[in-house]
Image (tube, rainbow, N blue to C red):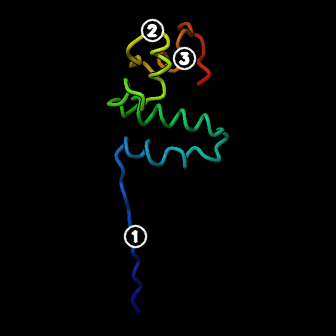
Amino acid sequence: MCVCVCVSCSVLDKTTFYRRDCASVLNGQGYNTTAIANVCNWMGYCGFPVGDEFRNTNTCNLYPQWLALNSSTVPTDAKNAVCPGVPAGDGCPW
């Protein structure tokens, strides 16, 4: 008797994971669709923790907000980028 098991595995780089699978991982974890869209965009396109090649383009949904604040770039520090104006030591809701 022979038993064959076929397993197909795919290892994704971080950028691909955050861009492709982030929403499915967060779905059902208590996040609303807006929060999922924002967090996955920040992680996959804004550079937190990967994907920074699009940080200062409209692909990163933080970029238009920073342009409106009269800045030409999104900060590289995630807390400052996501929660502008929140004083150091204060909690960021994100």
Q: Which residue is mark 3?
A: 83
Q: Please, what is the three-letter code of the amino acid marked with disc 1?
A: Val
Single out the mark in the foreground, 1 or 3.
3
Going from N to C along the chain, the mark reached first, 1 or 3, is 1
Q: Which residue is mark 2?
A: 70
28 horizontally vs 37: left or right: right
Local packing at callout 2 (Cα closer than 10 Å; few below 14, some 14-19, many 20+) is: few
**What residue appears at the point 64 percent right and 38 percent down from the top-left corner?**
31
Above-or-below relation of 68 to 43 = above
* Earlier-in-chain disc, 3 versus 2: 2
In what quadrant of the picture does the N terminus appear?
bottom left
**Residue type (three-letter) at the residue carrying disc 3:** Cys
Query: What is the distance, in whole Å, between disc 2 and disc 1 at their CAs?
Result: 52 Å
Relative side of 91 to 46, left or right: right
Residue 7 bears which disc, if any? 1
The residue at the point 57 percent across, 43 percent down is: 26
Q: CA distance from mark 3 to mark 2?
A: 15 Å
Residue 82 is labelled as: none
On screen, residue 76 above or below 26: above
Q: Is residue 34 left or right of residue 22?
A: right
Mark 1 surroundings: few (<14), some (14-19) or many (≥20) residues within 10 A: few
* Image quarter (top left, top right, bottom left or bottom right) of the C terminus: top right
**Secondary structure type for disc 1:** loop
**Picture coordinates of residue 47, whole percent (x, y):** 39, 29
How far apart marks 1 and 3 lie (CA) works out to: 43 Å
Residue at the far bottom in the pictured view: 1
Q: Is residue 86 left or right of residue 15?
A: right
The amino acid pointed to by label 2 is: Asn
